[in-house]
Amino acid sequence: MTMKVAVLGAGLMGKQAAGDLIANEKVEKVFLADLNVAQADLFVEHLGSAKIEAVYLDANDDEALKAVISKADVVINALFYTFNEKVARLAIECGVHSVDLGGHIGGATDAVLGMHEEAEKKGVTLIPDLGVAPGMINILTGYGASKLDRVQDIKLYVGGIPVNPEPPLEYNHVFSLDGVFDHYTDPSHVIRRGELLEVDSLSEIEHIEFEGFGELEAFHTSGGTSTLTETFEDVDTLEYKTLRYKGHAEKFQLLVDLGFTDRDRTVSINGNEIKLRDVLREVLAPITELGDKQDAVLLRVLVSGLKNDEALTYEYTMITVRDQETGVTAMARATAYTISAVAQMIGEGIIDRRGSYPPELIVPGAEYIQEMAKRGVEIKETVHRSAYQS
C-alpha cells in the first residue's frame, strides 16, 4: 500500500517530517506546503528527491487548504496550533487522515477530539497531540498501561536541556519563550488519591538521575498531561514534571514572584508603559538562544499497577541528543519523528481504527518504539517488580 502525504508548514518540524517521509519506499509522494514557498523549495532542492514537491499554501484560505489536503491520503499538520481545528475539519470533508502536534491552549486538541463521530462516519482517522509532551509520553503511557490489569500510578518526566549548560539559567529554549513562561506559571493538573487537582507550577521539586547528566531537578509545569488526566481518570496518582539542571526552578520562581512573567503587569519608564513580560523575554532571548549548541531531550515514563495481583512498574527512558552531522536539534528529531512515524502507520494500515483519538488510545507502543529506534531515537523499557521505582 503506497501513500501520498501532505505536510502543512515548512518550519523546523515540517521539514524534518518531510525528510523522514521520503525515506519510506511506501511513500509515493510528499507535498511540502507553506506560505513561504521559496523556503520550502530550497529544502526540496536540498533533499534532491523526485518524490517531494513544494507547494504554495495560505492556510487562512479554506479552499487553498482543501486543495492541498485533497492531494493526499494522510496530512501532517505542522502549522501553528490555532489551525488544528480547521485542518481536522477540512480533512474530514476531504476524506483524508490527519495528525497534528497538539495545542491545549485555546482547547485545540479538545476540538479535534470532539470530531470523533464525523471522522468515523467518513472513514477518517484523526490523532492530535503528536509531539513529545504531549505525544511520545502519551504513547508510552498507553503502552505501559496496556500491560497491566489495573493502573495505579503514572509519573512522567520530560526535559529539553543543553548538553553543556551555561549560567545563569543553564537552559536554552527550543520553542517560544512565551510558551515557556506559560508552562511555568499556569496551574499544573495532577491526580492525587484519585482526585483531579491543580498545583502551582515550578513547585514540589524532586531530584532524579539520568545517565550522562547526573542528578537533575524535576518540577510541575502546565500542559504536559494533556488528555492523560481524562483517559486515566481512575488512577490513584498521575503527575507530569519538567526536567532541568538543579537550581533552575528556584531562579525562575524569583522572576515569577517579582512579576516579570505576568501577562499584564506594566511599569512606566520616561512616560512609556512597558510590560515586564516583554522586558524579560527580550533579556532572556539572547541568553537562552540554542543556536549551534548541542541540546538533549530526556524522558522517563513510569506506569505502575497490578498484573495477576503482582505489583509492577513499566519504565520507559529515552535520551536523545542533537544530530551533529545534520544540525537537527534533539527536540526536533524526537517531535518530528513521532508525528511522521504515526502518519506512516496510518498510511500503511497499521493503525486502522477510524475516528478521533488521543495518542495513548490508538498508537501501538511496540511498533512505535521500533520505528523510533530505526530513526536513531532509542526508547528503553525496564520492568520493576515493585510498585515504585527501585
Image (spheres, grey):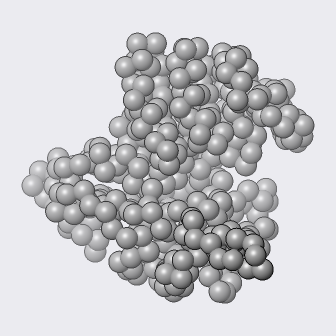
Quadrant of the drawing holding the C terminus: bottom left
Quadrant of the drawing holding the N terminus: top right
Residue 347 appears in the figure:
no
Q: Seen in the image, is 369 located left or right of residue 163?
A: left
Q: Nearer the viewer, residue 350 or 12?
A: 12
State the image quarter where residue 359 is shown. top left
**Residue 227 x %, y %:** 37, 46
Task: Name the residue: 57% across, 65% down.
Answer: 264
Task: Name the residue: 66% across, 87% down.
Answer: 167
Q: Which of 108 and 92 is in front in this view?
A: 108
Task: Name the residue: 44% across, 56% down.
Answer: 224
Residue 279 appears in the figure:
yes
Q: Seen in the image, is 100 located left or right of residue 79?
A: left
Which residue occupies the extreme front position in the image?
Answer: 271
Task: Name the residue: 65% across, 59% down.
Answer: 175
Query: Is residue 211 shown above or below 349?
Result: below
